[in-house]
Image (tube, helix red, strand yellow):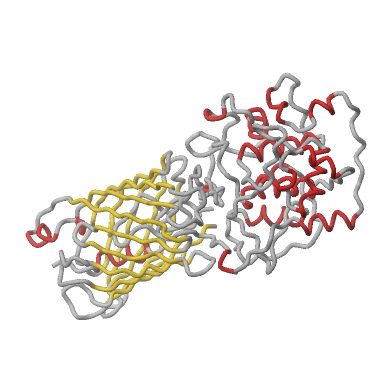
Amino acid sequence: MLILKPAIYILAALAISNLGQVAYASPANLNSQDNATLFKANAAHLLQQQAAQNNSTNVDSYKVAQATTFPDIQNNWAQSFIEALAARNVISGFPDGTFRPNAPVTRAQFAAMISKAFPLTQQREGITFNDVPSFYWASDAIQAAYQSGFLAGYPNNIFLPEQNIPRAQVLVSLASGLNLNASNVAILDNFQDAADIPDFARKAIAAATENRIVVNYPNLATLSPNQIATRADVAAFIYQALVRNGTVPPLEPTDVANQYIVGYETVATAPEPTPTSPPEQEVAQLREQFRIEPPTIVDTIRPTVPGGGSSVGSPTAFGADWGDAFLGASFQARARNTSRSDGGVSFGFGLGDADRAVGLEVAVSVVDLIGDTFEDGGVSLKLHRVLPNNFGVAVGVENATTWGSTDGGSSVYGVVSKIIPLRDDPADPLSKLTLSLGLGGGRFRSESDVEAGNESVNVFGSIGIQALERVSLIADWTGQDLNLGASIVPFNFPLIITPAIADVTGNAGDGARFILGVGYAISF
């Protein structure tokens, strides 16, 4: 019988599987996805967005493709804004070459754009946000935007980096950071939905309107202040703010985008207003007001790693890249066909870049901790590539080299994974589905082939659904066992706990067993 020792390391590693996944593709994710929010899917690491994912998208939170134009913005209303900012490296596209103009923007992604668009000078001392760890991909940008007065946090030192940012907040941020002052708040009455503008934002949005920063598509008279800002919206707002700042020239008079700039026609024949500096007290008050209503409960704070993993025992196509590292530990209450418990530990790191070329994940595992402690183990390798549309492919060798006894020897495999966003917001219930399907030998062979000594290949795969923001439910076929479990993110940092029941059908071995994986990942 094939004991679980050769697979112990994979459970430890998969306890942190899919950290930083391209988790939302609202459009992509890149969770957010964008948040991230966006966040990139992988089997053992925290991605810097979204990207980028995170983000893509994150995003913004994930890594992005460099381009000055994109196939999905041709003839888009915001094409001129987007291309101009892309040429200045203020905004970028996604790894598949698209821009996704209708994707939402998270607060972290917006902070990153601000840090690239404007020269940020410190106006106040920094602050430590409880939900923005130092290794978070946008940590520096968030701190710079805060210190310069463009952005502020929430009570209890909370920033909510993966929260999608409304249009009103973007406009308040720009007006606040540029020290703009409104001479006539009544200008807001020209908007058909002026009553929807939050009280804290009225003066700032009036100032932004007077300075021709407000861009309303498709209806010039509809501000939609509480609507989530799209990537196209933010590009238009930032470009107009740069025009107001004298950094970039206005759009050409023949550009169709001008028809969506509030006040464009009237100010085209009017003299340029003389900038006035607002009183310091009013500027300070405006900056302090740049926050929406505080969350009613602490649990609304989003974790930096949404969802958790998508596999319990079999590999996925996502892995660690350069700068990623992880630690994992596993425990099984009873090893297969024995009455004794067992456990394992693993650590690993990534090389290369799976977004642009190929990534290599290296994992070192020690198995059989209870007994011949540290005398058995191996090194496993996985080459992986992130493809457009949230696909990933990988080939790997578990226990490519070993010491002591790992029972099962080496296992060669190939696997394809796909993330399917089910909701625009990765915090919503049932927001993401991750599917993996692979083919492998070694420990992935059927129980009958193992017993007969047949060197065959077999199918394995997993399904993981992000049921809640911090919990994913998983079904995993290892080629021999059906495992059912959950992947839980209990805290607001990338610690993943994965309890599961192995061999729930009794298809291999001598009945169901409890297994537990715990993992932690960081990205430098």
Residue sitting farthest toward the left: 452
Q: Residue at x 78, y 34 (%)?
A: 243
Q: Residue at x 71, y 32 (%)?
A: 220
Q: Residue at x 43, y 38 (%)?
A: 388
Residue 31's spot in the image, x, y percent?
51, 50
Residue 56's spot in the image, x, y percent?
52, 45
Q: Quadrant of residue 160?
A: bottom right
Left or right: residue 18 versus residue 247 is: left
Task: Tell me, yes or no, if residue 50 can be seen here.
Answer: no
Q: Quadrant of residue 286?
A: bottom right
Left or right: residue 431 versus residue 126 is: left
429 shown above or below 211: below
204 shown above or below 496: above
Quarter holding the N terminus is bottom left
Nearer to the camera, 92 or 210: 210
Residue 266's spot in the image, x, y percent?
83, 27
Quarter holding the C terminus is bottom right
Q: How many marks?
A: 0
Left or right: residue 318 versus residue 457 is: right
Task: Tell me, yes or no, if residue 449 can be seen here.
Answer: yes
Nearer to the camera, 185 or 117: 185
Nearer to the camera, 425 or 202: 202
Residue 309's spot in the image, x, y percent?
40, 59
Nearer to the camera, 96 or 384: 96
Residue sitting farthest toward the top: 254
